[in-house]
């Protein structure tokens, strides 16, 4: 008789599913970046004198770029 055990189908399917889930998680999760230690802290801007505090900031620019087709 053969002294080695045969690989089971159930074990193979479990390993294939785990590998697929791990690959999907790596592809889908956003890239995490460490914060820049030397970046200066942003100081709050003073309120506008005549109202209308809208500013096109970095996050607004990113939103505008995401809506372009």
Image (cartoon, helix red, strand yellow):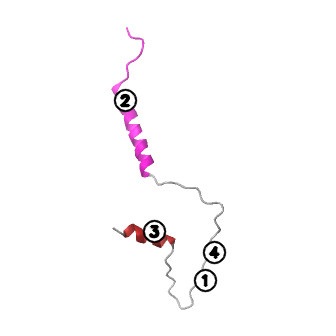
First of labels 1, 3 by sequence position: 1
Do tag 2 and tag 4 residues touch (Cβ < 8 Å)? Answer: no
Classify mark 4: residues with Cα within 10 Å, few (<14), some (14-19) or many (20+): few
The residue mark sitting in front, 2 or 4, is 4
In the image, the segment drawn in magenta is 1-28
The residue mark sitting in front, 1 or 3, is 3
Image side of residue 35 versus residue 24, left or right: right
The location of residue 15, given as percent across then percent down, is: 40, 33
Q: Main secondary structure of the magenta part?
A: helix
Q: Secondary structure at mark 4?
A: loop
Classify mark 3: residues with Cα within 10 Å, few (<14), some (14-19) or many (20+): few
Classify mark 2: residues with Cα within 10 Å, few (<14), some (14-19) or many (20+): few
The residue drawn where x is 41% and y is 72% is 64
The location of residue 12, given as percent across then percent down, is: 37, 29
Q: Secondary structure at mark 2?
A: helix
Residue 66 inside the magenta-drawn segment: no
Q: Check the image and name the residue furthest to the bottom.
A: 50
The residue under label 3 is: 62
- 6 above or below 20? above
Tag of residue 43: 4
């Amino acid at each position: 008789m053969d002294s080695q055990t045969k690989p089971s189908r159930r074990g193979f399917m479990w390993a294939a599913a785990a590998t697929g889930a791990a690959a999907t998680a790596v592809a889908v999760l956003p890239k995490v970046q460490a914060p820049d230690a030397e970046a200066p802290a942003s100081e709050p801007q003073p309120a506008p004198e005549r109202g209308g505090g809208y500013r096109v900031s970095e996050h607004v620019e990113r939103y505008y770029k995401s809506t372009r087709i």
